[in-house]
Amino acid sequence: MDLWFTEKHTDDVNFTIKVKKQLYSGKSYYQEIDVFDTYEFGRVLVLDGFIMLTEKDEYIYHEMVTAVPLAVNPDIKNVLVIGAGDGGTVRELTRYQSVENIDMVEIDEQVVQVCKEFLPQTACRFDDPRVHLFFEDGLKYVRRKQNEYDLIIVDSTDPFGPGEGLFTKEFYGNCFKALTDSGILINQHESTYYDSYVDMVKRTHKRIGASFPVTMVYQAHIPTYPSGHWLFGFASKNLHPVYDLKADRWNALGIKTRYYNTELHKGCFALPNYVLEILENS
Amino acid sequence: MDLWFTEKHTDDVNFTIKVKKQLYSGKSYYQEIDVFDTYEFGRVLVLDGFIMLTEKDEYIYHEMVTAVPLAVNPDIKNVLVIGAGDGGTVRELTRYQSVENIDMVEIDEQVVQVCKEFLPQTACRFDDPRVHLFFEDGLKYVRRKQNEYDLIIVDSTDPFGPGEGLFTKEFYGNCFKALTDSGILINQHESTYYDSYVDMVKRTHKRIGASFPVTMVYQAHIPTYPSGHWLFGFASKNLHPVYDLKADRWNALGIKTRYYNTELHKGCFALPNYVLEILENS
């Protein structure tokens, strides 16, 4: 059988992967949810037609949103995760014994249920006693919090559809308020390669900068996202992602990673000129 | 009209781009040559069905094979370029006033002719008086050379078809011999993301290491190559690509680049763990 899934990276660029079987297809209150089994990437989660993760390379995204802040502040104890229904971010966080509490706020319970059934590679640590799941709007949840979390990870969908509110100035301001004095905010920051994404990146960077004194951007190679050149935001009240890196302490933890290492940590903040220019003109 | 070009990144992954017009299609003695005008990437050069460059992002490749060695040794005067028929590597080299001579050895004259006609963005500096074009097999050319070049850039097609001989142990040994004592060899090193490429990367790395005491690998984001995570080899007789970086001297040249900068230079040698493991097991 010749079954192919296509994601439109732009109107004029398609990324197409051969599918063994469609394992799940459903529609929640918020979005369309699909899971495919594929030849090249293993199982693939698709929301509203966009690839969210593949079993082949999800570790890149999930290591990069967790190891980077935890190597800057190994004393992080209380973490808020917004979105991340697939469970990959929680899985990585539970590898750190020093983390005492993980609150995860996902708007769409159906995503978590589907991932528990079809993506055990990522949805495997929801039963850790430190993890508390809240099925509600992250935007509203964070409004009620003050000086509580050492780390907030915004592991959202793109800035349209259900994730839209997680890219607003009000939301970033509330994240600042919800963080402790050494707090760090990590967010997925889209990509600057295709022109159609540039305005979103600029807007996000500007809005975070309106609340946080330290706002840096770092990059990773994630081949199954549009262009494969993916950006993340690192914002904080006072910690610098490179100058404050505690490489020795992180390495002493002995956490085995497939993408992240502390040399790459320093390297991933060195952005190409064309990306720097876009961020500077935000 | 709905005209699309597809490159198979693997048997199970297609990258497909919308085409305005096929500007050229021909067959040389060595390979099939196509040039498309596309909506997203401008003009695109395709050899034997594989994208070699696009006007949108060719600067990434061409800056990374030239600025990296020239920032490590700003005294490079005599350069040998093998392959590179599109002219992009030569264009970048001619921006360095300190470079006195550029010998370019391309096996396929027809590629140069087609690029001169259809890709003026890259094929624009062949008339620089320092540039000397030789249409012959780079493998044979380099056998005759000894202690002559400060830099050899192997800007070849993939390790099958006409480029195959440029990935052999004999070839790398001859490059070592052709280089001066401070000589640097840069080669395009494929990618490790898709399993189907891994053996080639290992073999290449091992073969270069058999001749050169310093063999490092660096990376760039090139979205129009398979996986977008592309590797380059930096081999030398004694210069280290990061410890010997002359950032101040390179920055003083005032060369405007769109991807490369000297911070990124340091960062691009910090590879992900899964790439390091593949290279270590070569």
Image: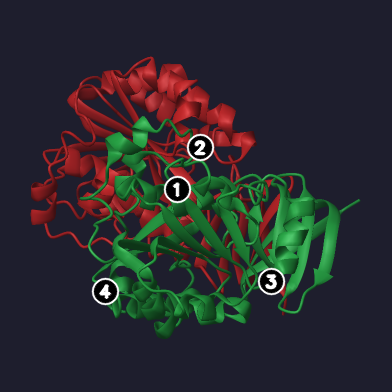
Chain colours: A green, B red
Image quadrant holding the C terminus of chain A, namely bottom left
User: Is the residue under label 1 in contact with that under label 4 (CB below 8 Å)?
Assistant: no
Tell me residue A55's x, y (percent): 67, 46
Tell me the crowding category of disc 2: few under 14, some 14 to 19, or many 20 or more residues within 10 angstroms, Cα based.
Answer: some
For label 4, the residue is A280
What's the mark number on residue A108?
3
Q: Nearer the viewer, residue B57 or A18?
A: A18
**In the structure shown, which secondary structural element does the residue marked by tag 3 occupy?**
loop
**In the structure shown, which secondary structural element does the residue marked by tag 1 occupy?**
loop
Q: Quick one: label 4 or label 2, which is nearer the N terminus? A: 2
For label 2, the residue is A258
Does label 2 lie on the same chain as label 4?
yes
* Visible residue check, residue B219: yes
Q: Nearer the viewer, mark 3 or mark 2?
A: 3
* Visible residue check, residue B145: no
User: Is the residue under label 4 in contact with that under label 3 (CB below 8 Å)?
Assistant: no
Chain hosting mark 4: A
Left or right, B127 with respect to A219, comes to: left
Left or right, B163 with respect to A44, comes to: left
| Cα gap from disc 1 to disc 3, whole angstroms | 25 Å
Chain hosting mark 2: A
Tell me the crowding category of disc 1: few under 14, some 14 to 19, or many 20 or more residues within 10 angstroms, Cα based.
Answer: some
Does label 4 lie on the same chain as label 3?
yes
Q: Quick one: label 1 or label 3, which is nearer the N terminus? A: 1
| Cα gap from disc 4 to disc 2, whole angstroms | 32 Å
Q: Nearer the viewer, mark 1 or mark 3?
A: 1
| Cα gap from disc 2 to disc 1, whole angstroms | 21 Å
Q: Nearer the viewer, mark 2 or mark 1?
A: 1
